[in-house]
Image (spheres, rainbow, N blue to C red):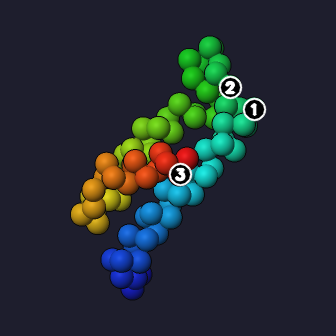
Amino acid sequence: EGSSPEEDYKVSCLLLVFVAVSLPQLAADPASLYNPELDGYNNNLHCLAKAIVQVSAALFTVHNKNIETHLKEFLLVS
């Protein structure tokens, strides 16, 4: 509360950086192995890609920023 739109935008960018640098640790987690019985992963890692796209689209639409540019930067960081 009381934060400026510029500060909110910076927090949104930092959130994507946090997710990007967390990906290697998530991939190394033993629960990140595919489970044929579940047709997915024990830790729901299969949902992560869609979640990243949806959350970043929401964050950067609110800030009137180019979503594609930010997702390309996300890929570079990860």
Residue annotated with mark 1: 30
User: How many dots with numbers?
Assistant: 3
The residue under the point 33% across, 52% down is 69
The residue under the point 31% across, 48% down is 68
Q: Earlier in the sequence, mark 3 or mark 2?
A: 2
Q: Residue furthest top?
A: 36
Kindly indicate the quadrant of the structure image that contains residue 65: bottom left
The answer for how far apart the CA atoms under marks 1 and 2 are is 6 Å
What amino acid does circle 1 point to? Pro
Q: Dot 2 lies on which element?
A: loop
Q: Dot 3 lies on which element?
A: helix
Spot occupied by residue 30 in the image (x, y as percentages of width and height): 75, 32
Kindly indicate the quadrant of the structure image that contains residue 51: top left
Residue annotated with mark 2: 33
| Mark in the foreground, 3 or 2 | 3
Quadrant showing the N terminus:
bottom left
Spot occupied by residue 19 in the image (x, y as percentages of width and height): 55, 52
In the image, is residue 58 above or below residue 40?
A: below
The answer for how far apart the CA atoms under marks 3 and 2 are is 23 Å
In the image, is residue 1 above or below residue 30?
A: below
In the image, is residue 50 above or below residue 59?
A: above
The answer for how far apart the CA atoms under marks 1 and 3 are is 23 Å
Q: Earlier in the sequence, mark 1 or mark 3?
A: 1
The residue under the point 47% across, 45% down is 75
Q: Is residue 74 visible?
A: yes
Residue annotated with mark 3: 77
Q: Are marks 3 and 2 in contact (CB under 8 Å)?
A: no
The residue under the point 47% across, 38% down is 49
In the image, is residue 29 above or below residue 2?
A: above
What amino acid does circle 2 point to? Leu
What amino acid does circle 3 point to? Val
Q: Are marks 1 and 2 in contact (CB under 8 Å)?
A: yes
